[in-house]
């Protein structure tokens, strides 16, 4: 495969078995961002072409084309001939070597700490229940609707965090306690409002 800039478009030239063929990078499965970057590089190369070879922009265009050729080689898994649009020099870019990562033998599952976890959940539940009841009783003195509204606000505020923490190993116990405290808070609310 060969990468070159033709006019203000990037093209890839490859042999498909019937002969060499020019291909637009957008038609290949290399990603839209890389295809767009290739065409932008070709437009800049077209604008810089014919200028002073010692100009820093020329070196930048050459280096950027080399980087894009490396990305194409990595994605396609095949060597890419890079034709510098300013000097005409051809360089071969090899795809990076695939390094085999050894797979761990077996992931050892730690035992679930039921005793400590339930203790944490119980303490957290009691703390949340105490806070909900205290808030509801305090606001009930003003009006019973505020006691119900406070339960709604506390529940709506805490439940998204409980949902996110439910699968985190340590925080799931806190989440269980908070959820239990909220549930018990709703069960005690009728006794506060109608009691």
Image (cartoon, rainbow, N blue to C red):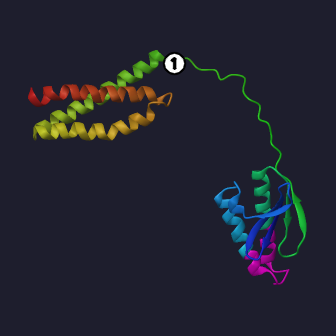
Task: Give the vertical position of 1 relative to 188 (above or below).
Answer: below
Query: Crowding near pointer 1: few (<14 within 10 Å), some, many (20+)?
Result: few
- Residue drawn at x 83%, y 59% as measured from the top left: 14
Q: Which residues are magenta?
A: 44-63
- The image shows residue 85 at horizontal and vertical percentages of 83, 73
Task: Read off the residue under disc 1.
Answer: 112
Tell me which secondary structure the magenta stretch mostly adopts: helix
- The image shows residue 191 at horizontal and vertical percentages of 14, 25
Q: Which of these two is toward me, 67 or 77?
A: 77
- The image shows residue 160 at horizontal and vertical percentages of 37, 39
The N terminus, quarter of image = bottom right
- Residue drawn at x 13%, y 40% as measured from the top left: 145
Count of numbered marks: 1
Q: Secondary structure at mark 1?
A: loop
- Residue drawn at x 24%, y 28% as measured from the top left: 185
Asked if the stretch drawn in magenta spans residue 179, the answer is no
């Amino acid at each position: 495969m060969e990468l070159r800039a033709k006019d203000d478009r990037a093209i890839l030239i490859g042999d498909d078995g019937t002969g060499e063929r020019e291909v637009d990078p957008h038609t290949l499965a290399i990603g839209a961002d890389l295809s767009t970057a290739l065409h932008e590089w070709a437009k800049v190369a077209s604008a810089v072409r014919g200028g002073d070879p010692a100009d820093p922009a020329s070196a930048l265009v050459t280096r950027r084309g080399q980087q894009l050729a490396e990305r194409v080689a990595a994605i396609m898994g095949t060597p890419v001939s890079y034709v510098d649009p300013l000097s005409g020099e051809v360089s071969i870019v090899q795809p990076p070597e695939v390094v085999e990562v050894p797979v761990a033998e077996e992931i050892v599952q730690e035992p679930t700490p039921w005793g400590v976890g339930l203790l944490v959940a119980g303490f957290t539940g009691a703390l949340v229940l105490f806070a909900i009841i205290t808030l509801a009783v305090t606001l009930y003195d003003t009006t019973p609707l505020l006691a119900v509204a406070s339960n709604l606000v506390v529940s709506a505020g805490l439940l998204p965090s409980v949902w996110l923490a439910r699968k985190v190993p340590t925080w799931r116990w806190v989440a269980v306690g908070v959820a239990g405290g909220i549930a018990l808070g709703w069960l005690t609310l009728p006794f506060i409002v109608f009691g």
